[in-house]
Amino acid sequence: MTDNMKKAAVLGWPITQSKSPLIHGYWLKSFGISGSYEALAVKPEDFSETVSGLAASGYRGCNVTIPHKEAALALADVVSDRATQIGAVNTLVFKDGKIYGDNTDGYGFINNLAQRAPDWRADVGTAMVLGAGGAARAIVHGLLAEGAPKVLIANRTLATAQKLAAFFGDKTQAIELGQIESHMQDVTTLVNTTSLGMVGQNALDIDLTSLPKTATVTDIVYNPLRTELLEQAQKLGLSNVDGLGMLLHQAVPGFDAWFGATPKVDDTLRRIILDAL
Ligand code: ATR
Protein backbone atom coordinates (compact mmCIF):
# COMPACT_ATOMS: atom_id res chain seq x y z
CA MET A 1 0.00 0.00 0.00
CA THR A 2 1.59 3.27 -1.06
CA ASP A 3 1.24 6.57 0.76
CA ASN A 4 -0.74 8.18 -2.02
CA MET A 5 -3.34 5.42 -1.96
CA LYS A 6 -6.71 6.90 -0.97
CA LYS A 7 -8.12 5.00 1.97
CA ALA A 8 -11.58 4.75 3.52
CA ALA A 9 -13.46 2.21 5.64
CA VAL A 10 -16.75 1.29 7.27
CA LEU A 11 -16.92 0.96 11.06
CA GLY A 12 -19.55 -1.13 12.76
CA TRP A 13 -20.10 -3.75 15.46
CA PRO A 14 -20.67 -6.32 14.11
CA ILE A 15 -19.57 -5.54 10.56
CA THR A 16 -19.57 -8.88 8.73
CA GLN A 17 -22.88 -8.20 6.95
CA SER A 18 -21.78 -4.87 5.48
CA LYS A 19 -22.00 -4.64 1.70
CA SER A 20 -20.14 -1.30 1.63
CA PRO A 21 -16.70 -2.80 0.77
CA LEU A 22 -18.24 -4.46 -2.31
CA ILE A 23 -19.94 -1.22 -3.38
CA HIS A 24 -16.87 1.00 -3.01
CA GLY A 25 -14.56 -1.73 -4.31
CA TYR A 26 -16.64 -1.93 -7.50
CA TRP A 27 -16.48 1.84 -8.01
CA LEU A 28 -12.73 2.04 -7.25
CA LYS A 29 -12.12 -0.62 -9.90
CA SER A 30 -14.45 1.00 -12.46
CA PHE A 31 -12.67 4.35 -12.14
CA GLY A 32 -9.19 2.77 -11.89
CA ILE A 33 -8.57 4.72 -8.69
CA SER A 34 -5.69 3.66 -6.46
CA GLY A 35 -7.66 3.29 -3.27
CA SER A 36 -8.92 0.92 -0.60
CA TYR A 37 -12.11 0.52 1.40
CA GLU A 38 -12.15 -1.96 4.25
CA ALA A 39 -14.61 -3.15 6.88
CA LEU A 40 -13.48 -2.63 10.48
CA ALA A 41 -15.16 -4.27 13.46
CA VAL A 42 -15.01 -1.58 16.14
CA LYS A 43 -16.49 -1.90 19.62
CA PRO A 44 -18.48 1.09 20.90
CA GLU A 45 -15.85 1.88 23.54
CA ASP A 46 -13.14 2.02 20.84
CA PHE A 47 -15.06 4.10 18.32
CA SER A 48 -13.74 7.57 19.05
CA GLU A 49 -10.10 6.46 19.29
CA THR A 50 -10.38 4.44 16.08
CA VAL A 51 -11.77 7.41 14.14
CA SER A 52 -8.97 9.67 15.41
CA GLY A 53 -6.43 6.99 14.47
CA LEU A 54 -7.80 6.69 10.93
CA ALA A 55 -7.74 10.46 10.47
CA ALA A 56 -4.17 10.63 11.79
CA SER A 57 -2.99 7.86 9.47
CA GLY A 58 -4.18 9.51 6.27
CA TYR A 59 -7.61 8.00 5.73
CA ARG A 60 -9.99 10.22 3.74
CA GLY A 61 -12.93 9.27 5.94
CA CYS A 62 -15.30 6.43 6.73
CA ASN A 63 -18.85 5.20 6.86
CA VAL A 64 -20.28 4.38 10.23
CA THR A 65 -23.07 1.95 10.87
CA ILE A 66 -24.86 0.38 13.81
CA PRO A 67 -24.21 1.07 16.69
CA HIS A 68 -22.00 4.12 16.01
CA LYS A 69 -24.27 6.57 14.17
CA GLU A 70 -25.09 8.73 17.19
CA ALA A 71 -21.50 8.63 18.48
CA ALA A 72 -20.34 9.82 15.05
CA LEU A 73 -22.75 12.75 15.26
CA ALA A 74 -21.30 13.71 18.65
CA LEU A 75 -17.72 13.32 17.47
CA ALA A 76 -17.83 15.32 14.22
CA ASP A 77 -16.44 18.89 14.28
CA VAL A 78 -18.87 20.02 11.57
CA VAL A 79 -22.25 18.35 11.01
CA SER A 80 -24.43 18.84 7.92
CA ASP A 81 -27.94 20.22 8.44
CA ARG A 82 -29.53 16.98 7.28
CA ALA A 83 -27.47 14.87 9.72
CA THR A 84 -28.42 17.22 12.55
CA GLN A 85 -32.10 16.86 11.64
CA ILE A 86 -31.86 13.09 11.29
CA GLY A 87 -29.91 12.87 14.56
CA ALA A 88 -27.32 10.45 13.22
CA VAL A 89 -24.22 10.41 11.02
CA ASN A 90 -23.37 7.64 8.55
CA THR A 91 -20.53 9.34 6.63
CA LEU A 92 -17.40 11.02 8.01
CA VAL A 93 -14.95 13.00 5.89
CA PHE A 94 -11.51 13.93 7.22
CA LYS A 95 -10.38 17.17 5.64
CA ASP A 96 -8.05 20.03 6.59
CA GLY A 97 -7.67 18.70 10.13
CA LYS A 98 -11.44 18.57 10.71
CA ILE A 99 -14.00 15.77 10.85
CA TYR A 100 -17.14 16.44 8.80
CA GLY A 101 -20.30 14.42 9.51
CA ASP A 102 -23.15 13.81 7.10
CA ASN A 103 -26.16 11.52 6.82
CA THR A 104 -26.81 10.21 3.33
CA ASP A 105 -29.67 7.78 4.08
CA GLY A 106 -32.47 10.17 3.07
CA TYR A 107 -30.45 11.16 0.00
CA GLY A 108 -30.11 7.46 -0.87
CA PHE A 109 -33.82 6.90 -0.44
CA ILE A 110 -34.81 9.83 -2.66
CA ASN A 111 -32.24 9.09 -5.36
CA ASN A 112 -33.28 5.46 -5.53
CA LEU A 113 -36.88 6.54 -6.25
CA ALA A 114 -35.69 9.15 -8.74
CA GLN A 115 -33.69 6.53 -10.64
CA ARG A 116 -36.14 3.60 -10.55
CA ALA A 117 -39.43 5.53 -10.80
CA PRO A 118 -38.51 8.62 -12.85
CA ASP A 119 -42.10 9.95 -12.81
CA TRP A 120 -42.28 9.82 -9.01
CA ARG A 121 -42.64 13.19 -7.27
CA ALA A 122 -42.72 13.86 -3.54
CA ASP A 123 -44.75 17.05 -3.83
CA VAL A 124 -47.91 15.68 -5.47
CA GLY A 125 -49.55 14.13 -2.43
CA THR A 126 -49.38 12.60 1.00
CA ALA A 127 -46.63 10.17 1.91
CA MET A 128 -47.18 7.36 4.39
CA VAL A 129 -44.17 6.00 6.25
CA LEU A 130 -44.57 2.68 8.07
CA GLY A 131 -42.23 2.55 11.06
CA ALA A 132 -40.66 5.24 13.20
CA GLY A 133 -37.07 4.11 13.82
CA GLY A 134 -33.77 5.46 12.55
CA ALA A 135 -34.45 4.69 8.90
CA ALA A 136 -37.90 6.31 9.10
CA ARG A 137 -36.36 9.47 10.50
CA ALA A 138 -33.97 9.80 7.56
CA ILE A 139 -36.76 9.06 5.08
CA VAL A 140 -39.25 11.51 6.61
CA HIS A 141 -36.54 14.16 6.42
CA GLY A 142 -35.84 13.26 2.78
CA LEU A 143 -39.53 13.35 1.81
CA LEU A 144 -40.09 16.75 3.47
CA ALA A 145 -36.94 18.15 1.86
CA GLU A 146 -38.30 17.02 -1.52
CA GLY A 147 -41.51 18.94 -0.89
CA ALA A 148 -43.94 16.32 0.42
CA PRO A 149 -46.95 18.35 1.61
CA LYS A 150 -47.83 15.82 4.31
CA VAL A 151 -46.16 12.76 5.82
CA LEU A 152 -48.17 10.26 7.86
CA ILE A 153 -46.08 8.16 10.23
CA ALA A 154 -47.68 4.85 11.19
CA ASN A 155 -46.04 2.74 13.84
CA ARG A 156 -46.76 -0.25 16.06
CA THR A 157 -45.77 1.88 19.06
CA LEU A 158 -47.79 5.05 18.54
CA ALA A 159 -45.73 7.05 21.06
CA THR A 160 -42.59 6.62 18.95
CA ALA A 161 -44.41 7.88 15.86
CA GLN A 162 -45.76 10.82 17.89
CA LYS A 163 -42.25 11.77 18.98
CA LEU A 164 -41.04 11.74 15.40
CA ALA A 165 -44.03 13.76 14.22
CA ALA A 166 -43.51 16.28 17.03
CA PHE A 167 -39.89 16.69 15.96
CA PHE A 168 -40.67 17.28 12.28
CA GLY A 169 -43.69 19.50 12.94
CA ASP A 170 -46.94 20.45 11.22
CA LYS A 171 -46.55 18.54 7.97
CA THR A 172 -46.22 15.23 9.79
CA GLN A 173 -48.88 13.26 11.64
CA ALA A 174 -48.59 10.11 13.73
CA ILE A 175 -51.24 7.47 13.14
CA GLU A 176 -51.92 4.01 14.51
CA LEU A 177 -51.11 1.00 12.34
CA GLY A 178 -54.77 0.01 12.60
CA GLN A 179 -55.78 3.34 11.02
CA ILE A 180 -53.72 3.19 7.88
CA GLU A 181 -56.45 1.88 5.59
CA SER A 182 -58.65 4.91 6.27
CA HIS A 183 -55.86 7.21 4.99
CA MET A 184 -54.85 5.11 2.01
CA GLN A 185 -56.90 6.91 -0.66
CA ASP A 186 -54.83 10.11 -0.25
CA VAL A 187 -51.41 8.47 -0.27
CA THR A 188 -49.17 8.88 -3.33
CA THR A 189 -45.96 7.54 -1.73
CA LEU A 190 -46.04 4.52 0.58
CA VAL A 191 -42.82 3.40 2.28
CA ASN A 192 -42.13 0.42 4.51
CA THR A 193 -39.25 1.17 6.89
CA THR A 194 -39.99 -1.67 9.32
CA SER A 195 -38.19 -4.98 9.17
CA LEU A 196 -41.45 -6.78 8.31
CA GLY A 197 -41.12 -8.62 5.01
CA MET A 198 -37.42 -9.28 5.51
CA VAL A 199 -36.13 -12.87 5.28
CA GLY A 200 -37.01 -14.59 8.56
CA GLN A 201 -39.66 -12.01 9.54
CA ASN A 202 -43.41 -11.97 9.10
CA ALA A 203 -44.80 -10.25 6.03
CA LEU A 204 -46.38 -6.83 6.36
CA ASP A 205 -50.13 -7.36 6.69
CA ILE A 206 -51.52 -4.51 4.65
CA ASP A 207 -54.13 -4.10 1.90
CA LEU A 208 -53.08 -1.65 -0.82
CA THR A 209 -56.37 -1.82 -2.77
CA SER A 210 -57.52 1.70 -1.91
CA LEU A 211 -54.27 3.45 -2.89
CA PRO A 212 -54.67 5.81 -5.87
CA LYS A 213 -53.53 4.26 -9.18
CA THR A 214 -50.80 6.92 -9.35
CA ALA A 215 -49.21 5.88 -6.05
CA THR A 216 -45.64 4.58 -5.75
CA VAL A 217 -44.87 1.86 -3.22
CA THR A 218 -41.36 1.28 -1.92
CA ASP A 219 -39.67 -0.85 0.71
CA ILE A 220 -36.35 -0.42 2.46
CA VAL A 221 -36.15 -4.19 2.84
CA TYR A 222 -33.98 -5.62 0.02
CA ASN A 223 -33.64 -9.24 1.14
CA PRO A 224 -35.75 -10.57 -0.47
CA LEU A 225 -35.54 -8.02 -3.24
CA ARG A 226 -39.20 -8.49 -4.14
CA THR A 227 -41.09 -8.32 -0.85
CA GLU A 228 -44.76 -9.28 -0.58
CA LEU A 229 -45.54 -5.57 -0.29
CA LEU A 230 -43.92 -4.86 -3.66
CA GLU A 231 -45.55 -7.92 -5.26
CA GLN A 232 -48.97 -6.76 -4.07
CA ALA A 233 -48.32 -3.29 -5.52
CA GLN A 234 -47.17 -4.88 -8.79
CA LYS A 235 -50.37 -6.96 -9.03
CA LEU A 236 -52.44 -3.80 -8.54
CA GLY A 237 -50.53 -2.11 -11.36
CA LEU A 238 -48.85 0.38 -9.01
CA SER A 239 -45.35 1.76 -9.50
CA ASN A 240 -43.05 -0.02 -7.04
CA VAL A 241 -39.37 0.25 -6.18
CA ASP A 242 -37.21 -2.19 -4.21
CA GLY A 243 -34.91 -1.15 -1.39
CA LEU A 244 -31.56 -2.19 -2.83
CA GLY A 245 -30.97 1.14 -4.53
CA MET A 246 -31.25 3.07 -1.25
CA LEU A 247 -28.26 1.12 0.06
CA LEU A 248 -26.32 1.79 -3.15
CA HIS A 249 -27.21 5.47 -3.52
CA GLN A 250 -26.43 6.33 0.12
CA ALA A 251 -22.82 5.38 -0.66
CA VAL A 252 -22.44 7.93 -3.49
CA PRO A 253 -21.63 11.12 -1.50
CA GLY A 254 -18.97 9.37 0.61
CA PHE A 255 -17.22 7.92 -2.43
CA ASP A 256 -17.30 11.31 -4.12
CA ALA A 257 -15.79 13.07 -1.08
CA TRP A 258 -13.07 10.50 -0.36
CA PHE A 259 -12.04 9.42 -3.84
CA GLY A 260 -12.85 12.48 -5.95
CA ALA A 261 -15.20 10.94 -8.53
CA THR A 262 -19.00 10.76 -8.67
CA PRO A 263 -20.01 7.11 -9.08
CA LYS A 264 -23.07 5.70 -10.83
CA VAL A 265 -25.47 3.11 -9.48
CA ASP A 266 -25.77 0.65 -12.37
CA ASP A 267 -27.15 -2.83 -13.01
CA THR A 268 -23.74 -4.48 -12.64
CA LEU A 269 -23.43 -3.09 -9.12
CA ARG A 270 -26.97 -4.24 -8.29
CA ARG A 271 -26.10 -7.74 -9.51
CA ILE A 272 -22.86 -7.86 -7.47
CA ILE A 273 -24.69 -6.96 -4.26
CA LEU A 274 -27.65 -9.25 -4.96
CA ASP A 275 -25.28 -12.16 -5.51
CA ALA A 276 -23.65 -11.42 -2.15
CA LEU A 277 -26.90 -11.37 -0.12
P1 ATR B 1 -34.20 1.08 11.69
O1 ATR B 1 -32.97 1.84 12.08
O2 ATR B 1 -33.97 0.07 10.59
O3 ATR B 1 -35.33 1.99 11.38
P2 ATR B 1 -35.29 0.55 14.31
O4 ATR B 1 -34.85 1.91 14.72
O5 ATR B 1 -35.04 -0.60 15.22
O6 ATR B 1 -34.59 0.15 12.93
O7 ATR B 1 -36.84 0.61 13.91
C1 ATR B 1 -37.56 -0.51 13.58
C2 ATR B 1 -39.00 -0.12 13.20
O8 ATR B 1 -39.68 -1.29 12.76
C3 ATR B 1 -39.80 0.46 14.35
O9 ATR B 1 -40.72 1.40 13.84
C4 ATR B 1 -40.55 -0.79 14.88
O10 ATR B 1 -41.77 -0.48 15.55
P3 ATR B 1 -41.79 -0.17 17.13
O11 ATR B 1 -41.37 1.26 17.30
O12 ATR B 1 -43.20 -0.40 17.54
O13 ATR B 1 -40.81 -1.13 17.76
C5 ATR B 1 -40.84 -1.49 13.59
N1 ATR B 1 -41.06 -2.93 13.78
C6 ATR B 1 -40.11 -3.86 14.03
N2 ATR B 1 -40.68 -5.08 14.15
C7 ATR B 1 -42.02 -4.91 13.97
C8 ATR B 1 -43.16 -5.78 13.99
N3 ATR B 1 -43.02 -7.08 14.20
N4 ATR B 1 -44.38 -5.24 13.74
C9 ATR B 1 -44.53 -3.91 13.52
N5 ATR B 1 -43.49 -3.04 13.50
C10 ATR B 1 -42.26 -3.52 13.73
Image (cartoon, grey):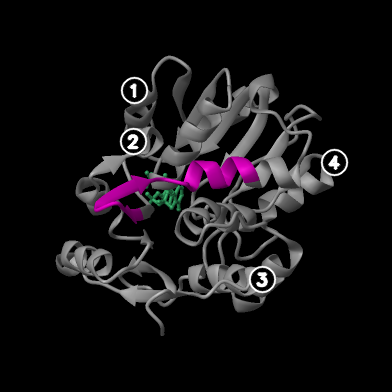
Residue on which the image places disc 1: 166
The local secondary structure at tag 2 comes to helix
Circle nearer the N terminus (2, 1): 2
Structural crowding at the residue carrying mark 1, measured as other residues with C-alpha within 10 Å and reported as few (<14), some (14–19) or many (≥20):
some
Structural crowding at the residue carrying mark 3, measured as other residues with C-alpha within 10 Å and reported as few (<14), some (14–19) or many (≥20):
few
Can residue 125 be spotted in the picture?
no
In the picture, the quarter occupied by the N terminus is bottom left
Circle nearer the N terminus (3, 4): 3
Q: Nearer the viewer, mark 3 or mark 2?
A: 3
- Using the image as rendered, state which of residue 13 and residue 101 is in the foreground: 101
Residue on which the image places disc 4: 237
Q: Residue at x 36, y 54 (%)?
A: 93
Residue on which the image places disc 2: 160
Q: Amino acid at mark 2?
A: Thr
Q: Nearer the viewer, mark 3 or mark 1?
A: 3
Residue on which the image places disc 3: 30
In the picture, the quarter occupied by the C terminus is bottom right
Structural crowding at the residue carrying mark 4, measured as other residues with C-alpha within 10 Å and reported as few (<14), some (14–19) or many (≥20):
few
Circle nearer the N terminus (4, 2): 2
Note whether ligand 1 is within 8 Å of mark 2. yes
Note whether ligand 1 is within 8 Å of mark 3. no
Quarter of image, res 207: top right
Gap between marks 3 and 4 measured at Cα: 36 Å
